[in-house]
């Protein structure tokens, strides 16, 4: 079998701005961290960004939006 793929596959996925949904244990972890440490949702996002990113990196989809962290 011979398959032929047509398209521009050299583009990176960094242009994608869609966020991943925050569900299950990740949501529980985020909310308990916010409640137990008595921090704002923006502060939690900053801590996650420092943990996951280096200077100049685009924001990854795994960092939750502040709206998804509000109670």
Image (tube, rainbow, N blue to C red):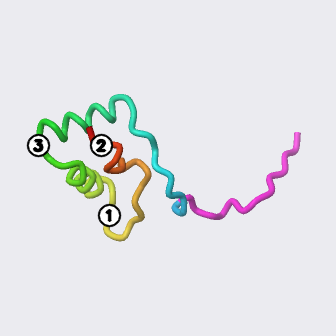
Q: Position of residue 9 (x, y in %)?
A: 69, 59
> In this figure, which residue is indicated by the disc labeled 3?
38
Q: Position of residue 17 (x, y in %)?
A: 50, 57
**In the rendered view of the protein, which quadrant contains the C terminus?**
top left
Check if residue 5 falls in the magenta segment. Answer: yes
Which mark's residue is nearer the viewer, 1 or 3? 3
Q: Judge whether 37 appears above or below 54 on screen.
A: above
> In this figure, which residue is indicated by the disc labeled 2?
69
Q: Which of marks 2 and 3 is nearer the N terminus?
A: 3
Q: Which of marks 2 and 1 is nearer the N terminus?
A: 1
Q: Categorize mark 2 by other alpha carbons within 10 Å: few (<14), some (14-19), many (20+).
A: some
Q: What range is drawn magenta here?
A: 1-13
In the image, 67 versus 52, the foreground residue is 67
> In this figure, which residue is indicated by the disc labeled 1?
54
Q: Position of residue 15 (x, y in %)?
A: 54, 63
Q: Where is residue 52 in the image (x, y as percent from the top left)?
A: 32, 54
Q: Judge whether 37 appears above or below 15 on screen.
A: above
- Please state if 66 lies on the left or on the right of 36 as rendered: right
Q: From this viewpoint, which residue is outermost toward the top?
A: 24
- Disc 3, SS: loop
Q: Categorize mark 3 by other alpha carbons within 10 Å: few (<14), some (14-19), many (20+).
A: few
Residue in the image at 87% along x and 44% along y:
2
Q: Which of marks 1 and 3 is nearer the N terminus?
A: 3
CA separation in Å, label 2 and label 3: 13 Å
- Disc 2, SS: helix
Q: Do the residues labelled 2 and 1 touch (CB within 8 Å)?
A: no
Which mark's residue is nearer the viewer, 2 or 1? 2
- Please state if 50 lies on the left or on the right of 6 as rendered: left
């Amino acid at each position: 079998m011979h398959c032929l793929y047509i398209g521009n596959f050299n583009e990176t996925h960094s242009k994608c701005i869609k966020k991943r949904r925050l569900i299950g244990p990740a949501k529980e972890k985020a909310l308990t961290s916010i409640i137990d440490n008595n921090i704002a949702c923006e502060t939690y996002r900053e801590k996650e960004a420092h943990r996951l990113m280096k200077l100049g990196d685009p924001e990854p989809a795994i960092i939750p939006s502040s709206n998804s962290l509000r109670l």
